[in-house]
Image: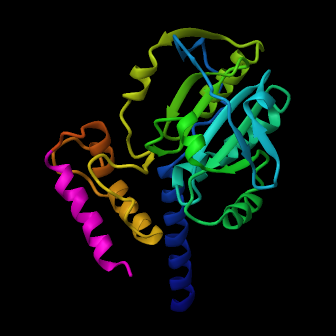
Amino acid sequence: MKLPNLLVIVALVGACGGLFWAGAHYARPSATAAPEGPVTLNFFSNPAAVAHFTAHDLDGGTISMASLQGKVTLVNFWATWCPPCRAEIPDLIALQNKYRDQLQVIGISQDEESADFVKKFTAAQHINYPIVMSTPELEKVFSGVFALPTSFIVDREGRIVQKHVGILNALTTELETRYLAGLDVNVTIEHVEADEASRKLIKDAAQATKIPGVDLDKLSPSARATSLQKLNAESCTCGCGLTLAACRINDPTCSISLPLAQKIVADAASTQP
């Protein structure tokens, strides 16, 4: 074999290896594996009713709480730049297609990019559920979104019965859908407090968008994106084993993560126009 050909093969193998690592880092839990026994699902013991809202999707359609009554609804906060968000899109597409009569998935994009940019992305991904650009109203109705993806599960009566932070487990999401839709499913139900669920650790499967003690609002969109990328990638040195973003969210009193996070934001601010 000639040396140039060998070098080409080595380069291709290296590139494929890099792609495999990127996919494995945010590998989607498979929904095809059948559990041996009943799976335990957790739902809020006192689910709150979703406040009335009206939103327009990227195709001009109108979405309201009234239009969702009678169906299970999965409200997925996401962004095009978020790796775990992109990783779970195929599962959401499959779920919407399989349970189109019982389930409505709604994607709420928190992109700083234009609606046209997001629409082109969704078309390329063949997304089959409506996408809405995030608004202050929607963030108030579905509160507590500090990281992406964050998904709210709403039952047929319009109550938020679960909130998942981080990439969804495809099997769990399908079982939740079947149970809430009244379909046959082998599960047991445990009820938890909503506050307990909100205190779950935010790890590297979720991309933080709001950092306690750090002001990101004064940054330009590009500087903000750069800061969030670093905050979600660099590890805190306090010994928690989490990223700086996750450490700030899970322990806002940490005196080690705060100056490190503030320096990243200050450096980004100093380079913006």
Q: Nearer the viewer, residue 215 or 168?
A: 215
State the image coordinates of residue 157 (x, y, percent, origin top left).
71, 17
Q: Is residue 169 above or below residue 128?
A: above
Q: Is residue 61 left or right of residue 229?
A: right
Question: What x and y, as percent, mark residue 145?
Answer: 48, 40
Residue 158 pos. (x, y %): 69, 22
- Toward the right, the furthest residue is 101
* Residue 151 x, y percent position in the rendering: 57, 36
Say which quarter of the image contains residue 47. Answer: top right
**Color theme of the render:** rainbow
**Tally of numbered tags:** 0
Residue occupying image coordinates x 79% and y 47%:
128
Q: What residue is rendered at 50% in x and 84% in y? A: 7
> In this rendering, does residue 202 appear at all?
yes
Taking the magenta stretch, the answer to whether it contains residue 262 is: yes
Q: Is residue 168 visible?
A: no
For residue 36: magenta?
no
- For the N terminus, give its image quadrant: bottom right
- At x 29% / y 64%, what residue is drawn? 265
22 lies left or right of 152? left
Q: What is the quadrant of the C terminus in the image?
A: bottom left
Does residue 105 appear to the left or right of 146 in the view shown? right
On screen, residue 180 above or below 221: above
- The span picked out in magenta is 255-273
**In this view of the protein, which residue sits in the foreground, 109 or 126?**
109
Question: What secondary structure is the stretch in magenta mostly built from?
Answer: helix
